[in-house]
Structure formats: C-alpha cells, structure tokens
Amino acid sequence: MLRVLTLSTLFPDVTRPNFGVFVERQTLGLAAHPDVALTVVAPVGLPPRPLSRHAHYHGLAGLPARETWKGLDVHRPRFLSVPGTGGRFHAAALARAVRPILTATPVDVIDASFFFPDGPAAVALGQELGVPVSIKARGADIHHWARAAATAGQVRGAGMAADGLLAVSAAMRDDMAALGIPAEKVLAHHTGVDLDRFAPVDRVAAKAALGVTGPLVVSVGALIPRKGHDLVIDAVAGLPGVTLLIAGEGAEREALEARIARLGLAERVRLLGAVPHGELPALIGGADVMALASSSEGLANAWVEALACGTPVVISDAGGAREVVTGRDAGRIVAREAAAVAAGIAEVLADPPGQGAVRAGAERFTWEANTTALYAHLKGLVEMRGTHLNPPLQGEVARSAGGVSPSR
C-alpha cells in the first residue's frame, strides 16, 4: 500500500466550494486507487491578529482543524501569512504548521499539488522525514511566484531539489525549463474532465433556461486581469446580437461592470458571479462559444470542460492552449486583443462544428488517465528514492522553507 500525503493550499472548503475543485477531483481519484492510503493536508493561511479577526477571514478561521471532506481525511492547519512580505515567509510558516501532522502520519511520499508555497515546504519536510517529494506546477504558481523577487529563489530551489515534478501541460514544462529546472525531470500531467457530467445538451433549451435567444458566448474564470474578461467584453461589443455571460468572481468586478455600462452592453453582457461547479455543464453546454483571453495559463480546466460539452473555444495562445485546440472543430487560438477575439468568435458562429466533433477533442482528458499517471509517478519516486537529489540545493531549500522566520 502506497502511503501518500497530498499537500495543497489550493483545495476547497465549505466557505470556498469552487476553490481548487480540480485539485479536489485529482485527489479523489488518487484516493480511490486500490493501492493508495491517502491523507490530505490543506493548510489555511491567515494574517496575524487583529487582521485575522476581520470579517473577510472569519469563515476560514472557523474551519475545523480536521474533517472528512467528500470521504477524504483532510487536515486544515493554520499558517501565518504576513501581509506586505511578498510571500517570502509563506513556505517557512507552512512547513512549521504541517510538521506536527507529518511526524504523526506514516508517509511514503509527499505529493505537493501546487508549486508555491507548497513545494518548498514539502521539500524541506521530505528531507526531514527521508521520503521523496513530488511537486505539480499548475499556472500562477510558476508564472507569478517564480518571477516575484521575494519567492523566485524558493520556487527554483524546490524545483531542483524535488525528487519528481509534474506540470499541467507541456507548455508549462517549457516555462519551468526556462527557469533552469531540467525539462527531463518534468512530466506533463494533464487534467481530467468528468465526461458524464460535462456533456452536450439541447442548446436551444439550455439557452431558454438562461433567458437567452440568439448566439451565446460564455466565459468562465476569476474576475482578475490576467483572464482578459475586458477583452472578451470589448469583442462582444462589436458583435451585434451576441450575448455574453461571465461566470466568476474577483477584484475586477466593479471595473468590468463600469466597462459594460460605458459600452452600453447591459442588455447583452451579464456577470453571473461565482457559479457552483455542478451548474457549469448547463451553462457551458448552452453556449455557442466559450471564450477566454488569458495572458497566462497552465491548462485551463474551463477549456477542456467546454469541449466535453460540445462547445468550441476561442482562446489566446497561453499555456497549453495548443495541446487542447488541435483542430478547427475545437475552436480558434487568437491574438490577445479584442479584434482578434471578435474575429475568432465570428468565425465559429458562422460555421459551427457539430457538438460530437467538438467533444471528441476532450475524450483524451479523463480522470482515469490522470489517476493512472499520478499513481505511477509517485510509486516510481518511492522505488527510485534518492536518485536525483542534489545535496547542496536540498540544504538551500530546507533553510529557505523550514528555518526562516519573519523576525529575521
């Protein structure tokens, strides 16, 4: 029996049910493997008092320290997240919070499912316990934290010292190699999609349920600048009669609302807020196009979920876009500018592919394949323990992730 400890700061809870649902689904798949005994540690970062008592953190502070979540044994230790430090001390604080759980839990391998701060902390803890560590890169954990001055060294050090690495796409593997992390050490590990839940529906009926007639474009993603919702809004402004529904919440909501009003699009563009993941199939399935103009991605789950619903995508050339859109039935990859997005949407609307042809592009992204690859990867690290460790880098990461405190 392979005893796995999955460490993830990107994991849902009762206050954030949509947070890291793809990590949750990957973890559920691994837990169901007959040769795996799994423990999940989903640390919760909180600022020091009195900030932690603010209403914004009230729900997180009230989460149980340990619970059964969808059949998983989940620990939720708190770690100190100090504002204004650029994340410099996150990994060190995370390692301290997780250490008591690890010392009391038999573990063969640590599976860090997000690169920062999870990765550096996992490497430090793995060295203490003498067990191998795998780290998975998903997107912002590399594109942001590996470029930020306060944390770049920790990210690169963890990548060099970990026993094995995963990336959500081959493009993400290339991004990691650009940091100096050996590409041959990184396995592309694609996400999965639930092909039973995300499936084609009667598009006319689905639109009617949404109160929409005519062409419908849907965008799914947090309301943050890098998702490019402003560009999709501008694109739809130039497409008369096209409706846009945006599912997601975030800091850009007020700015996007102002943009919609300024362009006179209130009748055609709606911000839906956070839509429960279980309601996304009906929303995406009713759309003629799913559009995202991201500046960076790993491999967006929304892309694959759209294809599974038979809905073609119009997306920017970010991350693993070319690993998903491999033919015109899947949609278009366009430049990250409103005119190009509008042209891509117009092309698909003018010559729409059949739902079955679109769905075929998603059929290789299964959770069964995801689980099989993850198990083989982790099992292999245990069997080959110690073959790619670099002692000087180990020490560097251990010091940065396990022995630094804000007082220094």
Image (tube, rainbow, N blue to C red):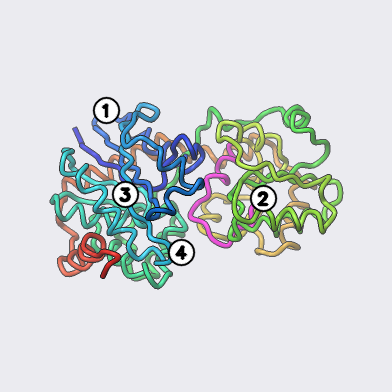
Q: Viewed as shown, does residue 25 lie left or right of 293? A: left
How packed mark 3 is, by other alpha carbons closer than 10 Å (few <14, some 14-19, many 20 or more), is many
Is 224 in the magenta?
no
Q: Which amino acid type corresponds to the residue marked 1 in the rendered image?
A: Pro
Residue stretch rendered in magenta on the structure: 290-308
For the N terminus, the image quarter is: top left
Mark toward the start of the polypeptide (4 vs 1): 1
Indicate the position of residue 339 as horizontal and vertical percent values.
Answer: 76, 63
CB under 8 Å between callouts 2 and 3? no
Residue behind mark 3: 112
Indicate the position of residue 147 as horizontal and vertical percent values.
Answer: 43, 69
Front residue of this view, candidates 59 and 293: 59
Q: Is residue 394 above or below residue 30?
A: below
Q: Which amino acid type corresponds to the residue marked 2 in the rendered image?
A: Ala
Residue behind mark 1: 34
> Which-is-in-front pick, marks 2 and 3?
3
Residue behind mark 4: 144
Which disc number belongs to residue 156?
none
> Which-is-in-front pick, marks 3 and 1?
3
Total number of numbered labels? 4
> Which-is-in-front pick, marks 4 and 1?
4
Front residue of this view, candidates 138 and 16: 16
Indicate the position of residue 384 as horizontal and vertical percent values.
Answer: 16, 50
Residue behind mark 2: 291
Secondary structure type for disc 1:
loop
Q: Which amino acid type corresponds to the residue marked 4 in the rendered image?
A: His
Residue found at x 57% / y 46%: 303
Residue 197 found in image quarter = top right
